[in-house]
Image: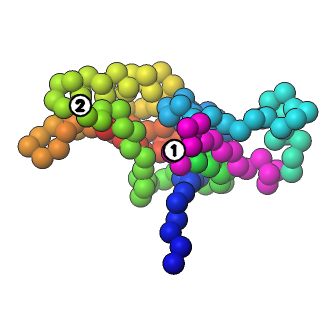
Amino acid sequence: MSSVKQFQVTFDCAEPARLAGFWCEVLGYVTPAIPEGFATWEDYHRSQPPEQSAYFACSDPSGVGPRLLFQRVPEGKVVKNRVHLCVRAGTGLVGDERLAALEAERARLAALGAAHVRTLLADEDNESCIVMQDIEGNEFCLD
């Protein structure tokens, strides 16, 4: 029996290259090298049939995190995500120190176009986390 060692996370979206750029900034990911003969990815995509420009990917330069694929779909987002990413900005921190780290990351991501949805403060069972939306409205958490 085979065991899966790698996976990718796929986002349905309106603007694959733009959303990939946002997540590259969030996670420190990189996009593949621009194909030879083209100055930008946009130039390359314009040279391709429309169905070929419907995808854009980025990956963790360390090879540890999953590849992210962004695929253009005609419909917009209408309901809450059933799956979301948790950006681990407060790992190992607790209390006020954790909340301060999460708030600093919230501010950095807001400057990139992310929207703050709500802050869930620590209680007896859980540490604080912040719910946000990316530039196309996909929910994710800072935890």
Residue identifier under label 1:
64
Secondary-structure class at tag 1: loop
> In percent of the image, x 48 and y 42: which residue is there?
137
On screen, residue 21 versus residue 48, left or right, reads left
Give the mark count.
2
- Specify the farthest residue to the front: 1
- In space, the residues marked 2 and 1 are separated at their CA atoms by 22 Å
Residue identifier under label 2:
93
In the displayed structure, 10 sits above or below 110; it is below
Q: Position of residue 69 (x, y in %)?
A: 62, 49
> In percent of the image, x 81 and y 41: which residue is there?
45
Circle 1 Cα neighbour tier, 10 Å, few/some/many (<14 / 14–19 / ≥20): few
Q: Position of residue 5 (x, y in %)?
A: 52, 60
Q: Which image quadrant for residue 131?
A: top left
- Mark 2 vs mark 1: which is more N-terminal? 1
- In the rendered structure, find residue 12 and report the number of the disc placed on it: none
Secondary-structure class at tag 2: loop
> In percent of the image, x 65 and y 51: which residue is there?
71
Q: Position of residue 21 (x, y in %)?
A: 61, 33
Q: Position of residue 81 (x, y in %)?
A: 43, 53
**Image: magenta residue range:** 50-66
